[in-house]
Image (tube, coloured by chain):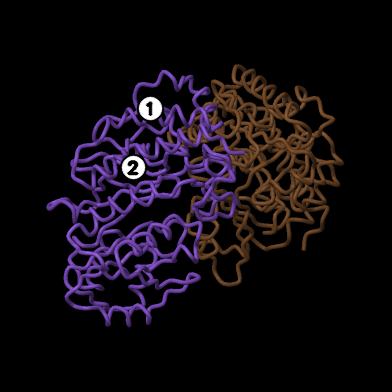
Chain colours: A purple, B brown
Amino acid sequence: MTDPVRLAESDALHARALAFVRAFEQGEAAPEPFDALAVDLARFQARHVAGYARLCAARGVDPQRIRGAGEAPAVPTDAFKVATVFAFPSDQARLTFRTSGTTVGARGAHPMRITSTYDAAALAFGRAMLAPDLEAPMPVLVVGPSSQHAPDSSLAHMCTTFAKAWGEGAWFLRDGELDVEGLRRRVAELDARRPAVILATSLALAHLLELAASLPLPAGSRVMQTGGFKGRAREVDAAELRRSVARLFAVDERHVVSEYGMTELSSQFWEGTMARAGTPPGVYREPPWARVVPVHPETLAPVPAGEIGIARIEDLANVDSAFAVLAADLVRRVSGGFELLGRAPGAAPRGCSIAVDEMLGGR
Amino acid sequence: MRTVDERVREVRRLLEAARRVYEQRHELVPSLARTTGLSPQGVLLGFESLERDATDAQLRALVESAGDAAHVHVILSANVFVGALRALALARAAAPRVTIRPSSRDPILTEALVAAAGDPAVRVTSERDPRASDADRLDVYGGAAAIARVRAAARPGVSVRAHGPGLGVAFVTRAADPVHAARLLAGDVVAFDQRGCLSPRVVLVEGDAAHAESFAGALHTSLEEWAARVPRGTLGQEERAEARRWQESLAFAGRAWSGSQHAVGLGDRLLVPPTGRHVQVLQVAAALRASELLAPIAGAIVTVGCDDPEQVRQVAPLHARMAMLGQMQRPALDGPVDRRPI
């Protein structure tokens, strides 16, 4: 059933989140303090997401008394698998992103009522971090599925959004099959004066490296790589993969930029190698509307500067779901951003009980 | 070729050894507490699950399930500490010669049992390479990675019997008294701090939401009482982190009762908790729904506990052992604990 007051409230919050994005695009200061919108999002979500109200109550947090983003409990990514995490009637969902499947069944679901905030945030920060100096239209070659073939993949949605907004998109992965010959032909056709953008998963790139020795792109081209290798036989060292990818496409290593995102979020994080000279690889930057806070895995309190914690991600673009998400990844704050240090290891079993990770096929 | 009666007699010698070790258990408690991470009270409770007797029929069933070999080499890379007895019994039933390599982390009970048995056909070894053994059969107890390593290392012609990790689940019928059922199940949870493959981590409660909530609340109370008598042992940082994450998820998805040394979560979708006295309770309208919910983890289920020996059949996977609540950690010595296909 439609609730006009709730939807109007959500619309207003989306507009405020979007104002952060527009200000960033214009090179202007944020329109309001981060915490002001964060607090309003937490209150809104506690009113309209039953699970979040329960989580707040269990932690003794009164959403009406929250004064800063850090006071709001974060929703673990596992909650997206076992509960509904959205603040609108289910018939209002325009799109539902789902996490990849596991042997234990449940896939996390992140329904969205409005996708324009997600799209605007992704485009603005993605462009700034990957191709700030390139002019649209530009060739965009996606070594991943399109949103048409993988409608519940947030990554496919993001890549399709980039391809549509930036220029001429072409896809080279269908039903899990890499179209190497198609990619080779498309690369050969590229205008040497117009840099291109490759959008790919790390797994696809590792696979591509086994099948192709050289696919030289026009000078100044960029490569986005994203995702890990969890549960897959193929695993490649990140630095080695970057070197190999740069060699494959004949681009500068600095032009191979990693992106970090997840189904449960509406914002992404990017390495700053392209955007800021001298930024080392492996250091991810946040847009002004999102923060990554390393927290202690037991107390969930922020860890001291420079220490490793699990990622508590505050994302102002996650208006209708969970503005604070507790990921399972290890991170550390460093100068200029944060480092991503892989997934928090599951506990090693000490008896003959099965570890949750082993049941999930991840160990 | 040894007769069945001879094999039964040789297993009985191991049971006699188990009784002698049990009588001296207090001497072993400090060292076992160090190696297992259980509290001293937890070690004593674990000893109650050490098999010390069995009927002839049970031992004949064990012999039948044990197979036949000339030399069985047992590799214990992960098990609850009393699991050594059954591993030895199965190997001895199968072969006139047994070598056993206990977990380097936890060799104490294996060594004590072998010493007490005084059986010249059974010897403890510390050799880590399975190729160094001339055994024609390897019995390996451990995680998927350990099993894969042993399989890969086995010499041609050597058979490998793998006993992987697993978990227990329970089904509480609508007819059950939730408080009584919770008291019984709490004992199953507390044993070995839930680190055994028989330890229940998921409970399906048949009936309405109130019945499930009553059970979950009563389980929380019972586990708190157990914590006073048998404190939980040490949990590693990663175990504590997993537990916190699971509790946060269940607090969001339904309701979580966090005790001083345990947690109980109530939700309507399966999220298997980590070990260390954490239990998920799910309400189900009927046994059929319980089977559906368990389907994704059916292959990992070793045992199903229930208050009703008839109804449990509707829920348990075909391979799983079935037990009454309160008896999940004490299966008869009639074959491997784990009846999944080897």
* Label 1 secondary element: helix
Q: Earlier in the sequence, mark 2 or mark 1?
A: 2
Location of the N terminus of chain B (image quadrant): bottom right
* Label 2 secondary element: helix
Residue at the image position 35 percent from the left and 39 percent from the top = A17
Query: Against B179, is B15 above or below?
Result: below
Marks 2 and 1 sit apart, C-alpha to C-alpha, by 16 Å
Q: Nearer the viewer, mark 2 or mark 1?
A: 2
Residue occupied by mark 2: A18
Q: Position of residue B58 (x, y in %)?
A: 82, 46
Please tell me if label 2 and label 1 are on a single chain: yes
Residue occupied by mark 1: A39
Q: Which numbered tag is attached to residue A210?
A: none
Location of the C terminus of chain B (image quadrant): bottom right
Q: Position of residue A199 (x, y in %)?
A: 33, 64
Residue at the image position 17 percent from the left and 68 percent from the top = A220
Q: Is residue B110 visible?
A: no
Q: Position of residue A4 (x, y in %)?
A: 53, 35
The residue closer to the viewer here, B325 or A320, is A320
Q: Is residue B199 visible?
A: yes
Residue at the image position 41 percent from the left and 31 percent from the top = A41
Residue at the image position 52 percent from the left and 42 percent from the top = A80
The residue closer to the viewer here, B125 or A328, is A328
The residue closer to the viewer here, B303 or A60, is A60
| Chain hosting mark 1 | A
Query: Against B113, is A182 above or below?
Result: below
Is disc 2 surrounded by few (<14), some (14 to 19) or many (20+) residues within 10 Å?
A: many
Q: Is residue A271 left or right of residue A227?
A: left
Q: Position of residue B133 (x, y in %)?
A: 54, 61
Q: Amino acid at mark 2?
A: Leu
Q: Tell which residue pokes out farthest to the left in this image.
A: A278
Residue A203: image quadrant is bottom left
